[in-house]
Amino acid sequence: MTQSAIIERLATLRAGLNEYNYQYYVLDAPTVPDAEYDRLMQELKALESQHPDLITPDSPSQKVGGEPVSAFGEVAHEVPMLSLDNAFDDDEFHAFVKRMGDRLKRDLQGGFCCEPKLDGLAVSLLYENGQLVRGATRGDGRTGENISANVKTIANVPLMLRGAGYPARLEVRGEVFMTRSGFEKLNQSQVEQGKKVFANPRNAAAGSLRQLDSRITASRPLTFYAYSVGLAEGGALADSHYGRLQQLKDWGLPLCPEIRLVEDAKGCTAFYQQILQKRDNLAYEIDGVVIKLNDLALQQELGFVARAPRWAIAWKFPAQEEMTELLDVEFQVGRTGAITPVARLKPVFVGGVTVSNATLHNQDEIQRLGIKIGDTVIIRRAGDVIPQVVSVVEAKRPEHAREIHFPEHCPICDSQVEKLAAEAVARCTGGLVCAAQRKEALKHFASRKALDVDGLGDKLIEQLVDMDWIHTPADLFRLDLAKLASLERMGEKSAANLVNALDKAKHTTLARFLYALGIREVGEATAANLAQHFLTLEALRQADMQALQLVPDVGEVVASHIVNFFAEPHNQQVVDELLDVGLSWPQIEVKAAQELPLDGQTYVITGTLSSMDRNDAKAKLQQLGAKVAGSVSAKTHCLVAGEKAGSKLAKANELGVRVMSEEEMLALFSQHNI
Ligand SMILES: NC(=O)c1ccc[n+]([C@@H]2O[C@H](COP(=O)([O-])OP(=O)(O)OC[C@H]3O[C@@H](n4cnc5c(N)ncnc54)[C@H](O)[C@@H]3O)[C@@H](O)[C@H]2O)c1
Ligand SMILES: [Zn+2]
């Protein structure tokens, strides 16, 4: 590179990093993944180390954080709050250990304190005589923002220290972060309120803590873990980092429970591996581990470089977020017809694997992301979770970026795609004919509450579909005995049994038939109601939204599923074919006039009724279908006993006949509005 090319590259890197710092530290809304930032920073540092004469004091490589926002009020840090140097692999970690040994020219005694690198933001808490008097952000390391009112709302930040022996002035440093579950809940409620969602828990924590209205901070799920002492006056502290952390704990400050003291570099490596294993199961996000030389005298001897101590290092984990290009979007049809947009990506190494696909979930998600084909996108892959598209780097949108069009027809079977306003998912309506849904649709079709085909189990259905013998349910009834018998693990006898079972299953009921079709949200009970209401398949097929909603339990959503189903030509064809192959059912008899509640029961009335005379009571009981008799016998169902009831009551008791008071009888009448 020529000198002028180097100067130009340095300027570009610095301008880029400064912009990213501003987005990250001031706006709490980064637009590129940390991995991209780290790459640019490494490139800057490498160039600067080759050309030390070109280092400027305002280079991002020499600075900590971003400018504090003045609206909060300033806090001058008496002891600067610095950053940490990074190691990205084993070699870099061992180089760090060696550097310390070389500089000290002796053994590193006292061990290492190993801590998870919490992904939140650094906070300083000042305690005077045990009382929390001030909270501040790191800011640019020298000047932070005064966020006292906000830190006081964090549930696990003690307002008073416990116990005794703490220094009169004690500045505790630590990380404020948001748990994954807290983050998800917050984002969900942001979506519900139509507010912007946060890209990750780190931004959510920073955005929540740096609120001018502390009531908002109070409503956010923030947690604090202490990780060091900044300043201590008027009281002695332990002479090791780990020892001091234990003191903080005794005084009521929360520590990350994973912190360990280890003897040597090997112990650090083991810790790194162990935490990496645990990473996805921790309640909060971490982006590495921090290794600190434990002995404070050695720490002091080592001191600091421009922006970080020499005695600590952030040993970063492989990135879980990366940047790549969206090449195309394909639409996959699931087993239940749900249509999922899948991002085809320029392959990128993230979360330990090369990723070339990511889910886009649904149409709403595409809209929320504002994503276009050709965009540069941030991909996240954590643990075994399917890679997700987190956001779009809008600044990198090319001119040729294309809108994503959600298909109106199923890419597999060309049936209409249905999307209900109340649901995020779009679905193919071709249930019975859609190859993507065929196996599930057929399993449902043959199941016990549907056509109940004996011997046609899930395994066999899968086999038949895989052989490409069955395209629609009607094909089941066209299966030929010889062909079936030739199937693996089948044999003549079972083949014959299956053909018989299929034959038998042709004689069904309209309700079972409707249920078997697998229309969305038409369960057994709805199918029965539809059959009872429309009596014939023809009538149901003709029914419009309004007519359908007259059926008990059928609302607008179910009605539209039914209308869409029968409007689909593929489905019409399947239904016709099923009738052609001989599916039939007995005509439904119109149910006799409604049964009366006391049909077939014999009542007897005795004693004096206070609210009506006996004849009226008798008429009302008859109105409900009861027979009213004059004497109690074993056949009596119930005796209504008024005041001064005598022998009839005794007889009823003797025979174990149910006795009803006048009040109970009145309740029965009012229950039936008579
Ligand atoms: N995406 C972006 O645009 C963008 C912009 C700026 C910075 N960043 C990210 O931030 C990093 C630089 O930020 P930084 O200067 O805060 O450095 P850092 O995050 O690499 O390390 C220092 C910070 O680590 C935190 N930390 C967590 N656990 C700790 C522990 N146990 N002990 C001590 N500190 C602990 C503290 O907040 C401390 O300030 C970059 O490497 C990058 O990943 C990203
Ligand atoms: Zn389909």
Image (cartoon, helix red, strand yellow):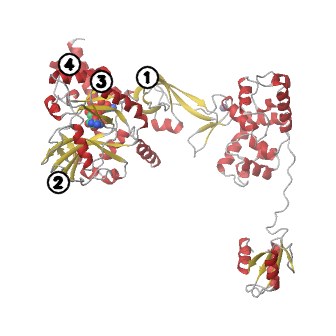
Q: Are marks 2 and 3 in contact (CB under 8 Å)?
A: no
Real-space Cα separation, disc 4 to disc 3, in angstroms: 14 Å
x, y percentage for residue 133?
Answer: 20, 52
The residue to which callout 1 is attached is 348
Real-space Cα separation, disc 2 to disc 3, in angstroms: 45 Å
Q: Disc 2 or 3, which lies upstream in sequence?
A: 3
Q: Are marks 4 and 2 in contact (CB under 8 Å)?
A: no
Q: Residues within 10 Å of mark 1 (few under 14, many from 20)?
A: some
Under 8 Å from ligand 1: the CB of mark 3? no
The residue to which callout 4 is attached is 49
Real-space Cα separation, disc 4 to disc 2, in angstroms: 46 Å
Q: Amino acid at mark 1?
A: Val
x, y percentage for residue 143?
Answer: 18, 41
Mark toward the viewer: 4 or 3: 4
Asked if one can make out residue 68 in the rendered structure from this viewpoint, the answer is no
* Element marked by disc 2: loop
* Element marked by disc 4: helix
The residue to which callout 3 is attached is 40
* Element marked by disc 3: helix
Q: Disc 4 or 3, which lies upstream in sequence?
A: 3
The residue to which callout 2 is attached is 129
Asked if one can make out residue 489 in the rendered structure from this viewpoint, the answer is yes
Which corner quadrant holds the C terminus?
A: bottom right
562 with respect to 187 (left or right): right
Mark toward the viewer: 2 or 3: 2
251 with respect to 550 (left or right): left
Q: Residues within 10 Å of mark 3 (few under 14, many from 20)?
A: some
653 with respect to 304 (left or right): right
* Element marked by disc 1: strand
| Residue 638 position by quadrant | bottom right
